[in-house]
Amino acid sequence: MRATSGPILPLVMQIAVPAGLGMLFQTLFNVVDSYFAGWISTEALTALGASFPVYFVLIALLVGLGQATTALMSNALGEGDEPMARRIFVQAVLATLAMGILLALFGLVAVEPLLRLLGVRGESVALGRAYLVPIMLTSALFVANATVNAFLTCQGDARSYRNALLFGVLLNVALDPLFIFGAGPLPGLGVLGIALSTILIQALQLLYLLHRLRHSPLGRACGWFALRFEPRVMAALLRQAVPTTATMAITGIGLFAITFFMGRHGEAAVAAYGVALRIEQLVMLPMIGLTTAALTLVGQNHGARLPDRVRQVTRTVMLLALAIMSLGALLVWPLRETLMGLFSDDAEVIRLGAAYLAVAVLIFDAYALLAVGFAVLQGLKRPVFAMYVGLFRHVLGPLMVLSLLDPVLGFGLAGIYWGIAGVAWLGGLATLLYLMRRLRALNA
């Protein structure tokens, strides 16, 4: 795919549709795990749910490295410098190996204390450890998949990862019950079986993606890669990866902060917020595809020094994002109680979740500004601003605004809901203003 010429919209759709479908399949993969964990026991389901904040450490690292690799390789390809794209990828592979070692040590040392810190007790601690430790020990597989996907995505190939994720979710439906409950000579492994199914599928996906790498245009041109450490290239990669990883980590901290304020109003409020987040995430799925397209196309056109085309890509993706999120808001608002009822039969949870969603739909367009803005800035090799906005939106803003509206002024849950909306819109508008300034500066 040549991103530096031709109509913009078809190029966006060529990347966005497969990438969005891939994220849908990844979401379904997690749903399958939760479904079969519920078959084991309530404690197993609790362990899997409590494992997510710890698992988020892995997610933050692989997203940070994957997006950084895509951005820098896209810029190099836009400049016509394929050898530099290859060198960037080699440093990403070395970073993957280093991250795998660190995450393995993290899994051995920190998993159980973190589960206890999150309030997990009794049998759920052992079950959480049985699930998380094998995942962390083999985390290099997860990061490697993100790194190889970045190599393919920067060339416009989002279909290979989509295919890998579709294959993964279908195989998971078969492997989860087989490993959990056993069959014939194979013993049932319980929660450990869920982890082993995930690890095996990650390994198979990596083999497929490596096959696609070897047969991609850049892969054929480069041949075999020599793993040679280059400090300057690695430093450039880390400058791009660290802010994005930090932004993801800050998001996790923000979820803890908001959940804390929800928890002041009882377990039903926490449960309602958790369910409402799932609904928001489903609406946000198309954003994953659009941000992938923005990152790749902006990166290549920025590398090729085509500022007008960078602005065209940004405008096209932003308008699509705003249209999709506005449509999502129009669909969710009248159906909010029905949607909550799909996840819970508790009347209080449904009531509180519907009340939150009535406000949350007003934030959907702010989410579009944030997601697309961050992706474009990453493609322009300016990821630090997103980290600052993330710090305000997920940590400083909620701590200041929600503390004022709820405990001090006593507005309760309504104050929390509107506080979340206000902080999100401040972040979205700040991102838009900064993005517009950076796009104007491309003429200089």
Image (cartoon, helix red, strand yellow):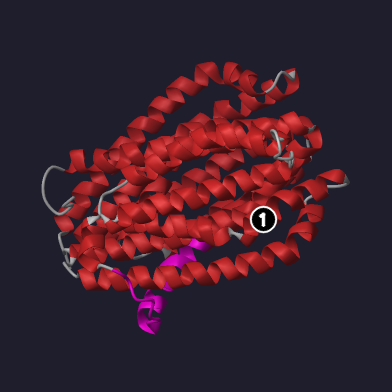
Query: Residue 395: in sight, yes or no?
Result: no
Horizontal side of 165 relative to 320 (left or right) equals right
Residue drawn at 40 percent across, 83 percent down: 231
Residue 176, located in which quarter of the rendered image?
Answer: top right
Say how many tags the image has: 1
Q: Relative to 331, does residue 135 appear above or below in the rendering?
A: below
Horizontal side of 232 relative to 278 (left or right) equals left
Picture coordinates of residue 243, whole percent (x, y):
47, 65
Residue drawn at 57 percent across, 28 percent down: 357
Residue 286, located in which quarter of the rendered image?
Answer: top left
Check the picture and name the quadrant holding the C terminus. Answer: bottom left
Residue drawn at 68 percent across, 26 percent down: 352
Residue reaching furthest left? 6
Within the magenta stretch, is there residue 338? no
Main secondary-structure element of the magenta-colored stretch: helix
Secondary structure beneath label 1: helix
What residue does disc 1 label? 134
Residue reaching furthest front? 185
Residue drawn at 44 percent across, 38 percent down: 167
Picture coordinates of residue 382, whole percent (x, y):
36, 65
Residue reaching furthest right? 122
Q: Looking at the picture, which amino acid does disc 1 mark?
A: Pro
Within the magenta stretch, is there residue 232? yes
- What segment carries the magenta color? 224-245
Residue 339, located in which quarter of the rendered image?
Answer: top right
Picture coordinates of residue 379, whole percent (x, y):
31, 59
- Viewer-side residue, 22 vs 389: 22
Horizontal side of 400 relative to 77 (left or right) equals right
Q: Relative to 278, does residue 5 appear above or below in the rendering?
A: below
- Viewer-side residue, 51 vs 358: 51
Q: Relative to 198, does residue 240 appear above or below in the rendering?
A: below
